[in-house]
Every structure is written in C-alpha cells, then in structure tokens.
Amino acid sequence: MKIGLLGLPNSGKTTIFNALTRSEVEVSSYANSKAEPNVAVVEVGDERITRLTQLYHPKKTTYATIEIVDFAGLTEGSARKDDFSSIQMNVVSNLDAIALVVRNFSDDLTGAPAPIADIETIDTEFILSDMIITEKRLERIAWSSKRGKTSNAMLLEEKILKKILEELNRGRHVRDLILNHNEQKLISGFQFLTHKPFFVILNSEEKNFGRNQDLLAEIEAKYKVIEFAGNFEMELASFDDSEDARLFMAEMGITESARDRMSRFAYEILGHISFITVGTDEVRAWTLRDGETALEAAATIHSDLCWGFIRAECFSYDDLMVCGSEKGIRDNGCFRLEGKSYKVKDGDILNIRFSI
Ligand SMILES: Nc1nc2c(ncn2[C@@H]2O[C@H](COP(=O)(O)OP(=O)(O)O)[C@@H](O)[C@H]2O)c(=O)[nH]1
Ligand SMILES: [Mg+2]
C-alpha cells in the first residue's frame, strides 16, 4: 500500500513524514520545494503478529508495510502550472490513497491556521487539474470524430468523460460517481486526482490537540479525517526509550503511535484486511481487499499457490488465542477447510494446500 502526503507548503508534510517513518528529513519553512519526494517504507504495527511470533518462534517475522511518500508543496494555481502533471504521472499514479496534510498551527510566515480554507484550496486545484485533463481528452475526441475517425469505444469514453466533466463542474469528485467495471477500466488511465481514495490529516498544534471536535466534525461532513500533533509526534518517534515515549503520549491523551493510527485508518478507508501465515519459518501478515477470496489470498503469496490451489486450511487468530494452540483449534472444531471462493476475513490464519 502506498500513501502520498500532499498539501500546501509548510503544512507539516515532512514533519508528519518523519513522525510516521522515524526519518530525520530536514523540516523548515524554507525547505527546498523542488526537492525529490521523500519515500520510506513503514511496518504496520500489528499486535497479532507480535503474539504469533511469541507462539511459533519463527526464523523470520514479517509485518505488512505501507510506503509513505512526502511530496513538495502544492499551491493555489498548481493545476495550471506544471506541478501536477509531473507529480501526477510519475508518482500519484502509483498511490493507493492521497493524504492531504492541513496546517492547524500558527506559523510565523503564514499566520493563523485556516484549515477549512486550505482544504478547499487544494480540493479546487485537484478538481481543476482533472477538468483540464478531461477537457483536453474531449477536444481530441471531437477532433477525431470531425475527421470521421471514431469507434464505439471512443464514443463510450466521450460519454463518460462528459459525465465526469459535469460532475467536476459541480465541484464534485470522480470518486463520487458510480461507475460500472467497464467505465472504471476506461478511465483508469487518466489517473484523476479526485478519483483516488482521499483523507485529511489535520496537523494540530500540540496545545490544541484533542480539542478540535467542532473543526473535525466540520471537515468530516465532507472528508475522512484523522488528527495528528505533527511536531510532537515527530519528537516522540525519535525517542529510543519507549517507556518515556509512552509517558509523554499518555500526557497528551495519545494511546497509539502516529504510525499505528494512520495504518489502521488507511486500512479502513481502503477497505483492506490482513490475513496471516504462520509456521516455524515465518510468521507473516498479508494484505487483501475486503471481499477477496482464498484464491486471491493464494495468489498474493505466490502464483504457484493460485494455479495449484486445492484447499485453504483456515482458523481465526481470535480462536487461536482462546484455544491456545493448533491442537486446541482442532479439538474445539475451529479448524476449517475452505474452497477457492471463500471470502477471507481479517485475522484469518491460512495455509494453502496446493499441487503443481
Ligand atoms: N507548531 C507546530 N509547528 C509545526 C507542526 N508541524 C510542522 N510545523 C512547522 O512548520 C514548518 C514546516 O514544516 P514542514 O514539515 O517542513 O512542512 P512541509 O513544507 O509541509 O513539508 C516547520 O517550521 C515545522 O517546524 C506542528 O504540528 N506544530
Ligand atoms: Mg516538506
């Protein structure tokens, strides 16, 4: 899973990036805005994997990972400049979700925070950028059809793009449109910014953190939102001594690290779940979309397991914790054999039987 941090300059993107990834990228009001994006991979904290490691003593433990990308700032007018085209084509196209970092702290340069206005500014840029792409493509289609060069696929594309343009003109997003599978496929190449799963990270001043219920509710009316105290959490992430970190967190009313909260939030928004494989070699978390099947789980592990799929041996993590061991699982009738079309659940422990 890949998540991109976007936002206005000085909204705290790099600060949040450092907090999430325990990196130490320079944070400053004058940081070079044309620098390459910062990229880091973080492990998804998962207590189940930790406990299974204690139970199986594997040679290797592998947590799920999320890749975080910290972009240069966007500004009003970005859609009309080159800012988006390069970002969009190279990096945004690979993102699974966009996290918009919004400043909710006072800044010497830019003054008092205006989070709602900032969100609208960026949202407008995203919509504009998608409109420009749509209009350009529609012009080309019109040009082709004037010369008698049309196809059914092109007509269908034109129809969808007009629908999209109408939606964007109303200030709405491509992701709000209900599109069938075929339509989704037709427009996937455009990489519309307003098509990606999207959420807001409200980056709050330490002393206001946890006291922004009204503001959060206002944002939530339109977008998914999570609050961070960026600066504070960046400092926390740099602590080696976790006992100290826990004390500081408790003081702030933070029960989980920024990284853990963000991963949980992202899994929820993207409708992702984890299944687990266990053994003496490796205990490992894998990611699936909610609703995906045992066959898709097999393919995630290795294509051979998919081609030669026979059955999935399955029990749940929760049952294992209650029964204490795999023997206990079998004795209590919690062990199942599932077929290809079984819908995998979060926390399922799977062993794929296969032959090639
Ligand atoms: N008070 C406060 N300042 C912050 C916070 N997050 C970032 N800043 C400051 O805002 C400035 C810009 O931060 P940076 O992370 O580089 O922003 P970016 O341009 O979006 O990457 C720096 O001076 C940070 O110290 C925060 O949560 N609280
Ligand atoms: Mg930065």
Image: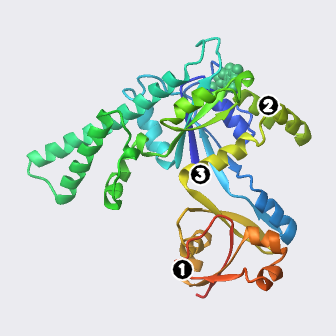
Tell me whether the residue at label 3 lies in contact with that at label 2, contact meaning CB atoms closer than 8 angstroms.
no
Q: Is residue 244 above or below residue 293?
A: above
Label 2 packing within 10 angstroms: few (<14), some (14-19), many (20+): some
Name the residue nearer the viewer: 349 or 39.
349
Q: CA distance from mark 1 to mark 3?
A: 25 Å
* Residue bearing mark 1: 340
Chain-order first, disc 3 or disc 2: 2
Q: Which residue is mark 3?
A: 268
The image quadrant of residue 3 is top right
User: In what element is the residue under mark 2?
Assistant: helix
Q: Is residue 355 above or below residue 186?
A: below
Tell me if residue 57 can be seen.
no
The three-letter code of the residue at mark 2 reads Met
Residue 17 is situated, as x and y percent measured from the top left of the image, at: 67, 36
Q: Secondary structure at mark 3?
A: helix
User: What residue sits right under mark 2 in the picture?
Assistant: 252
Instruction: Between label 1 and label 2, give the one nearer the viewer.
Output: 2
Three-letter code for the amino acid on which mark 1 is drawn: Lys
Viewer-proximal residue among 323 and 144: 323
Point out the image quarter for the C terminus: bottom right
Residue depicted at 77% across the width and 61% down the height: 48
